[in-house]
Amino acid sequence: MRYKVTHTTNYSYAEPVSQCLNTAYILPRNTLSQSCIHSELIINPVPVSTDERLDYFGNRCCYFTIEQGHSAMTVTSTNLVEVTPSNDWSGLDFGSTCAQVTDMLKTSSDPKILLAREFLLDSPTISRTEQLRDYAAPLFSSSRPFLSAVRDLNQQIHTDFTYDPHFSDVSTPLSEVFEHRKGVCQDFAHLAIGCLRSLGYPARYVSGYIETLPPPGQEKLVGTDATHAWFSVFSPSEGWFDLDPTNNTATNEQHIVTAWGRDYTDVAPLRGVIFGGGEQHTLDVSVDVRRV
């Protein structure tokens, strides 16, 4: 499936900004199942410097600096991406058991396994806790196929938690999400990652986009798609496997990967430092994912 993805971010400031320094993770990366054919990044006001490079995790990161005074900033990323299905539910009731995965993670010297183990550790917004471990542990009996247990964790989060865009923001602690049983895609991804790490399994955060389809007979509106987040879990024998607890599914050709890291803080779409701007600013984000 080939998509044109347009992601526009508009900032408006209460007072003039004299200078800003920013990082953007809004350029899709290449993966085994995804190829970014073309990318264009338009920034207004025009930066004095722009530098795209790969970060530690291999994500495409753009650094830019604006040194002229401005009261608004617009960043638009337009990308042509080809996606092929890579994950499905078939085969999850076979493969390595939870006990075998635990043993391989502890004893193997395979470079891929050693590299994945860095995703066992706590990260800025996700800590391993007994509460998260106890929530997920009943699913992960030692003799059970590992990915089957992960699938059921994905479903359990989808069932137990309510999607509520008004409850949380990027600063809401995971403990509050767990207590109130509500949040958004970012929270559910963090929750799954926290559960898996608390059990000793590597998991990472994936940011990207998801294509949404209009009701039958209606035309799709421009800008009604959204940034999205899900999680990826590592099995020594099967590799990385992506699941989406918000939609209770494995990722498919409608999921477009931008970046991955330990949690949201590694791959926030746009962040930076401004000089000036006052105490208040407004943010408007529009995402459009179109099949081409």
Image (cartoon, grey):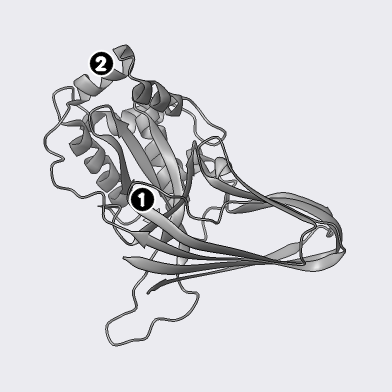
Q: Is residue 217 above or below residue 146?
A: below
Residue 227 shows in this picture: yes
Type of the residue with mark 1: Phe
Identify the residue at horizontal 77%, vertical 61% (top origin).
Answer: 280
Side of 141 relative to 251 (left or right): left
Q: Where does the image place residue 219, in percent across and percent down from the top left?
A: 37, 86
Residue 130 shows in this picture: no
Q: Point out the image quarter for the C terminus.
A: bottom left
Q: Where does the image place residue 165, in percent across and percent down from the top left?
A: 49, 60
Side of 192 relative to 90 (left or right): right
Place residue 13 in its image quadrant: bottom right
Callout in the foreground (1, 2): 2
Sooner in the amino-acid sequence: mark 1 or mark 2: 2
Identify the residue at horizontal 55%, vertical 56% (top origin).
Answer: 26
Identify the residue at horizontal 44%, vertical 70% (top origin).
Answer: 4
Q: Which residue is mark 2?
A: 103
Type of the residue with mark 2: Asp
Q: Where does the image place residue 157, in percent across and percent down from the top left?
A: 32, 46
In front here: 36 or 242?
Answer: 36
In front here: 225 or 85?
Answer: 85
Place residue 55 in its image quadrant: top right
Q: Is residue 231 above or below residue 20?
A: above
Residue lying furthest front: 37
Q: Residues within 10 Å of mark 1 (few under 14, many from 20)?
A: some
Q: Where does the image place residue 264, in percent across and percent down from the top left?
A: 53, 44
Numbered circles on residues, count: 2
Q: Secondary structure at mark 2?
A: helix
Side of 186 relative to 251 (left or right): right
In front here: 179 or 151?
Answer: 151
Identify the residue at horizontal 39%, vertical 20% (top origin).
Answer: 114
Q: Which residue is mark 1?
A: 161
**Mark 1 → mark 2, Cα distance in angstroms:** 31 Å
